[in-house]
Amino acid sequence: MTDHLQQLYPFLHGGERSADSIDAALLVSVREKAGESARVKTQFFDRCGEGVVAVARVLADRFRRGGRLLCMGNGGSSCDAAHLTVEFLHPVTAGRPALPAVDLGASNATLTALANDVGVEQIYLRQVSALGRAEDALVGFSTSGSSANLLAAFQRGREMGLATIALVGGDGGAMAQSPNIDRCLVVPSDSVHRIQETHLAIYHILWDLVHTLLADSRGDLAGAEAGR
Ligand SMILES: O=C(CO)[C@@H](O)[C@H](O)[C@H](O)[C@H](O)COP(=O)(O)O
């Protein structure tokens, strides 16, 4: 086994390497990773639950104003953007209305044309410019918090009056410091996978909170955009 593989899979190095012993080691790894996934989520929601409520209020307020949700991300995070979009467009819970959401990563033709002609930094900025309306909310997912194409789109969205929300990881990267982002939820982990798993839990919960707020007969959304 090469040094590189030994580093990646230490439990396969040395000692007995029967199929059973490898499975036993893999099982330990399964439990360690599942435990870490649960710990990261618990830590995030303990520290940042109020931030999730605040984001839900912003989104509910934007929907009430007739706004839409525009979603974006790169790689695995583009799948999260697509998933969040479908949650709102096609609610799985009976009695909950569909709400308008747009996945800015959905069109291969649009993305490849923009990347090819003007550069990958502009694939979301250009779409926000063309599609965005002041009453909309722009949500971006980034594990590093520093993807240039999202930062550029947030800046444009902010200039146009959209509410801007980032779900990020690690130390929050540039997005945690950006004046163009109204709300930044930072998952405290350096693992791309653990961050994405927590993002999924966050937006499932956000979806639920938004519908709860919209169903609130009092319509009490006072302070919906506190912090702006
Ligand atoms: O994490 C995965 C797959 O899970 C990758 O595809 C990852 O999303 C890509 O490397 C992205 O380009 C990373 O961008 P970001 O999350 O730092 O904004």
Image (cartoon, rainbow, N blue to C red):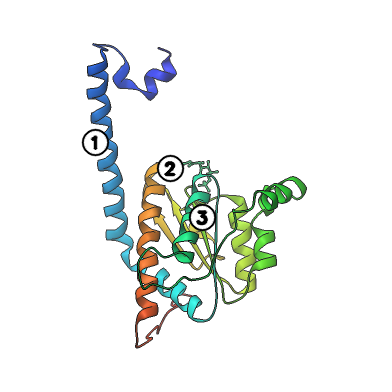
Q: Dot 1: few (<14), some (14–19), or many (≥20) neighbours within 10 Å?
A: few
Q: Dot 2: few (<14), some (14–19), or many (≥20) neighbours within 10 Å?
A: some
Label disc, if present, on residue 153 of the rendered structure = none
Asked if 143 appears above or below 182 in the picture, the reply is: above
> Who's the residue at 69% across and 50% down the image?
109
Mark 1 lies on a secondary structure that is helix
The amino acid marked with disc number 2 is: Val
Q: Locate residue 33 relative to residue 140 in the image: left or right.
A: left
Mark 2 lies on a secondary structure that is helix
> Who's the residue at 48% across and 71% down the image?
99
Are the residues tagged 3 and 2 within 8 Å (C-beta)? no
Q: Dot 3: few (<14), some (14–19), or many (≥20) neighbours within 10 Å?
A: many
The residue tagged 2 is 192
Asked if 59 appears above or below 154 in the picture, the reply is: below
The mark nearer the N terminus, 3 or 2, is 3
Label disc, if present, on residue 82 of the rendered structure = 3
Relative image position of residue 11 (x, y in whole percent): 29, 21
Q: Is mark 2 within 8 Å of ligand 1?
A: yes
**Disc nearest the viewer among 3 and 2:** 3
The amino acid marked with disc number 3 is: Ala
Q: Residues under labels 3 and 1: Cα distance?
A: 29 Å
The amino acid marked with disc number 1 is: Arg
Relative image position of residue 102 (x, y in whole percent): 56, 63
**Disc nearest the viewer among 3 and 1:** 3
Quadrant assignment, res 129 = bottom right
Q: Give the mark count.
A: 3
User: 207 or 143: nearer the eye?
Assistant: 207
Mark 3 lies on a secondary structure that is helix
Residue 51 visible in the displayed image? no
Quadrant assignment, res 206 = bottom left
